[in-house]
Image (cartoon, rainbow, N blue to C red):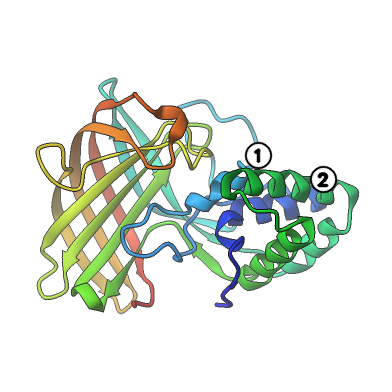
Amino acid sequence: MKTVQHSRAPFISLSFVVALALAGCGDKASPPVASSGGGGAGAPASPAAAVEAIAATAAAVAPGTPAPLASNERLQGTIELDLGKGPVALRSMATIMDANLGKQVAERLNSVQGQQQVAKANDRIEAITGTSGGKADTASQVQAIADSYAGKTVFTSFMRHVAIVKRHSVTLDAQLPQGPRITLDMQLSDKDYRLESAMVSYYPKSGDYFSSFTTQKSGPDAAEVTIDKFEQINDTTYAVEGSFKATNLVPAVLAKKLEGQTVEQVQGRFKFTEVVVKPGF
């Protein structure tokens, strides 16, 4: 996969790139909210997506009601999230990107509407970073991301080997469009796949990537995770099932507008049939 080497690239989400392309071609498929795998072990999936919330889904989806799968989507797994009012099923998707994504984005970037969207994204990047790279710089990064993902499959949940710490890092990420999102980051021993640590991050709004609550890394408020099943399906895929519980979640470092708030408890179960193995580092 082509790597975008630039300080502004981490603040441009794949969701924004896809939304930009769809706005130009009239496609009603929902843009994915998925990790590009560039955040590193244990990092929240795609925090950069705060630059631009998803433009729109195919239709308004009521909380608790999953949308039908698009033709380019398949289900990786589910997380049943319970905040004390009963479980809600959140889904993790694999999304096949359009082979013409680069062309669609290029055409959109040349339109007045596309330039307005990029200008808005650029303003938000500058507000976050305190830099002033300019619209042309942002547009070039948008195009680079579109070109690098065209025709590829984007996985929301995945695992990778981190040799330096002798661990497998597993990220399970599920959401409900226009509803909550949750990520479960687990560190497993690379010798026997024994669970060594875990963190839970809860996003009240799936499209707001800078507004999340997270568990403590250790101590009485650390996440409790039980893995009931961890099975290798083939060389690149694992199936994972289990449960989790976390108390006293606090705002993440970048969640400035959540300061002073806490989430008393989150718990649930997860069941995944397709957790793909990404290249390690």
Residue 263 location (% of width, % of height): 29, 27
Disc assigned to residue 58: 1
In the picture, measured across the screen, residue 257 lies left or right of residue 164, that is right
The residue positioned 27% from the left and 50% from the top of the image is 271
| Label 2 environment density (alpha carbons within 10 Å; few <14, some 14–19, many ≥20) | few
**Quarter that holds the C terminus:** bottom left
Q: Number of callouts in the render?
A: 2
In the picture, measured across the screen, residue 87 lies left or right of residue 50, that is left
Disc assigned to residue 158: none
Residue situated in front as seen by the camera: 218 or 15: 218
Residue 93 location (% of width, % of height): 46, 53
Which residue is situated farthest in the top direction here? 85
Q: Amino acid at mark 1?
A: Ala
Dot 1 falls on a residue whose secondary structure is loop
Dot 2 falls on a residue whose secondary structure is helix
Q: Is residue 71 visible?
A: no
Residue beneath disc 2: 116
The residue positioned 40% from the left and 37% from the top of the image is 212
**Would you say the residues marked 2 and 1 are in contact, meaning their CB atoms lie under 8 Å apart?**
no
Q: Is residue 10 visible?
A: yes
In the picture, measured across the screen, residue 254 lies left or right of residue 32, that is left
The Cα atoms of the two marked residues, 2 and 1, are separated by 22 Å
The residue positioned 20% from the left and 70% from the top of the image is 167
Residue situated in front as seen by the camera: 178 or 112: 112
- Of badges 2 and 1, nearer the viewer stands 2
Q: Amino acid at mark 2?
A: Gln
**Quarter that holds the N terminus:** bottom right
Residue situated in front as seen by the camera: 110 or 120: 120
